[in-house]
Image (cartoon, grey):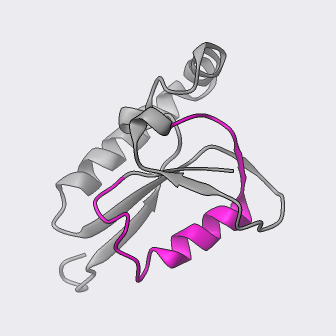
């Protein structure tokens, strides 16, 4: 990325990756571990690599994705005390990602996206 002069990386992992693991409640965490545990182990590695890079980065963690329309009624939660599971449309995730190109509000943060 340095060779290509990339300065900012906006990365999507998911709710349950990194330090958001365990914040979804008992049922979510149990099902999550059984179904997606290995996938999220890789997402943890991905997040560590991004955090250690010299890039300007934002790691975005959407909750359960839906095919619903763009609503603009989503929330980006940076404080772990506010993290909770829920649903969000892929269109709202895309909207948030595009906004991060020029917005520094979540620079070097890992917001959870939920509706």
Q: Position of residue 95 (x, y in %)?
A: 62, 72
Magenta range is 83-109
Q: Position of residue 70 (x, y in %)?
A: 77, 68
**In the displayed structure, does residue 101 sit left or right of residue 34?**
left
Q: Count up the numbered dots.
A: 0
**In the displayed structure, does residue 54 sit left or right of residue 44?**
left
- Snapshot quadrant of residue 59: bottom left
Q: Nearer the viewer, residue 79 or 88?
A: 79
- Residue found at x 43% / y 61%: 11
Q: Position of residue 3 (x, y in %)?
A: 19, 83
- Residue found at x 28% / y 60%: 108
- Residue found at x 42% / y 42%: 43
- Residue found at x 83% / y 65%: 69
**In the displayed structure, does residue 34 sit left or right of residue 91?**
left
Q: Nearer the viewer, residue 39 or 31?
A: 31
Q: Nearer the viewer, residue 44 or 64?
A: 64
- Snapshot quadrant of residue 32: top right
């Amino acid at each position: 990325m340095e060779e290509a002069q990339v300065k900012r990386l906006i990365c999507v992992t998911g709710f349950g990756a990194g330090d958001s693991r365990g914040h979804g409640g008992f049922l979510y965490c149990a099902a999550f571990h059984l179904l997606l545990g290995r996938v999220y182990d890789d997402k943890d590695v991905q997040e560590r690599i991004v955090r250690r890079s010299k890039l300007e980065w934002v790691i975005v963690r959407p909750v359960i994705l839906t095919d619903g329309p763009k609503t603009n009624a989503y929330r980006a939660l940076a404080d772990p005390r506010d993290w909770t599971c829920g649903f969000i449309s892929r269109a709202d995730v895309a909207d948030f990602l595009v906004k991060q190109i020029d917005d520094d509000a979540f620079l070097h943060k890992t917001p959870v996206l939920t509706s």
